[in-house]
Image (cartoon, rainbow, N blue to C red):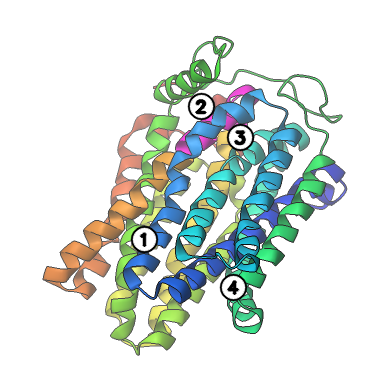
Amino acid sequence: MRSLLGNATFLRLFAGRLVTNAGDSLAAVATMWLVHELGGSPALTGLAGALTLAPNTLQFLFGPLADRARLDRLLVGSQLTQLLVVLAVPVSWALGSLSVWVVMAVGPLTALLNQPVYPAQSAALPRIVADDELTDANSAFAFALQGSDSVLNAVGGVLVAAVGGVAVFLVDAVTFGVAALLFARLGLGRPGGEGTPDGEREDEVVAADGGDTEGGTSYFGDLREGFSFVRGTVLLHMAFVPIVVNFQGGMNLALMPGFADTLGGATAYGTLLSVAAVGMLLGSLVAGPLDSLPYGLLAPVALTSSGLAWVAGVYIPGLLPTAVLFGLAMLPLGVMSVLTSALIQSAVETSMLGRVSALLASSSSLAAPLGAFVGGAVADGVGVVPIFAASALAFFLAAIHHLVVPSLRRLPPVAEARRIETN
């Protein structure tokens, strides 16, 4: 980790990612508040939330851009366009034309414009840090971003109360401007092309052979190539785990308020959300020393541990033991999130990373709203507590999948990721 602190390019990428994440968090908080304030309808607030989450499922569309474009220009362009979009709210307010529909358009559009940032980050990290630093680099990103989400959601609420939702959008615009300045100094060109910092590793085809990666001559050709690459490797099986876990997360999103009512209401709700975030944070922090363990065996152990802690947390009475167990259930997921990112970055050639990471993220994002819908509908007839507990089946199912699929079970430690074999 110490060597990363001496890597100026990594620090600029890290700082820019942190600042733009702050902008996203503030935008989400301010959007929901203004929709509530201007629309006065829970249905409109719910619709705004759904629309703001929806762009996450489209992230795969930006993968080819991360693999083809100059990464610094892609990142800067994303930030500057978001800056202009969020300014629509204070400008509309100044002109006396601000409406709930303006805010509902700005929220999803801002989220959509930020989708290139994650695949660009994934494509950039292996080019600016050494192979044996990837786990630490991903751990630093995961810990900082998850931590900033927790803090900035609270900060956003305080700012809304202090200066109003419109003013928060002005603060938001500043964050995107600062992020653009940081990204502009990265000096990252196209993968394998000009304008890349010293020490960038050469493109290399790893054992997870997805076919000829030079065949994509257009955006749509690159997009198809991304699908073909994933379909031809163990990555297709790896994608199953975040899909199942996100489905469980969607169920929890819908059921957590009702479950918290059985433990004391709003205070319990806030407590459970906080300890879940802390568990993920701690998991991302301790992931580094675990990258020497075989991934294929560590994953089912981690998933099973999460499932057992979750079920125990639901049925052991009392807020304190439930909170502790929920935090413990999230800790292994934080570990696996970091190690999975590092494994993919080590096992996929640089020219494909944007497409592959974006495609995997989009596929898993689709599961969350589906889980929320199914969980809410079933719990309405059966009851919240049993369905909340049954959501842990997702962890056990993912663990079994890892054990019964040979290519998953044989996955090596992250440091040896080039040995991944095709199906």
Residue at the limit of the structure toward the left, as seen here: 381
Verify whether residue 356 appears in magenta: yes
Q: Is residue 285 visible?
A: no
- Which SS does the magenta portion mostly show? helix
In this rendering, is residue 348 above or below 173?
above
Mark 3 element type: helix
Toward which corner of the image does residue 69 lie, by quadrant?
top right
* Sequence-first tag of 2 and 3: 3
Task: Specify start and end residues of the magenta stretch as a single range.
Answer: 345-360
Q: Is residue 370 visible?
A: yes
| Image x and y of residue 356, in percent | 52, 31
In this rendering, is residue 243 above or below 308?
above
Toward which corner of the image does residue 287 lie, by quadrant?
bottom right
* Sequence-first tag of 1 and 3: 1
Mark 1 element type: helix
Q: Tell me whether circle 4 and circle 1 mark residues in contact (CB < 8 Å).
A: no
In the visual, does 308 lie left or right of 179? Answer: left
Q: What residue type is disc 4 on?
A: Gly
Question: From the image, which quarter does the C terminus lie in?
Answer: top left
Q: Nearer the viewer, residue 177 or 390?
A: 177
- Comparing labels 4 and 2, the label whose residue is closer to the camera: 4
Mark 2 element type: loop
Toward which corner of the image does residue 157 lie, by quadrant?
bottom right
* Cα distance between the residues tagged 4 and 3: 39 Å
Disc number placed over residue 420 in the picture, else none: 2
- Comparing labels 1 and 3, the label whose residue is closer to the camera: 1
| Image x and y of residue 140, in percent | 69, 54
Q: What residue type is disc 1 on?
A: Leu
Q: Tell me whether circle 1 and circle 3 mark residues in contact (CB < 8 Å).
A: no
The residue beneath circle 1 is 47
Disc number placed over residue 165 in the picture, else none: 4
The residue beneath circle 3 is 345
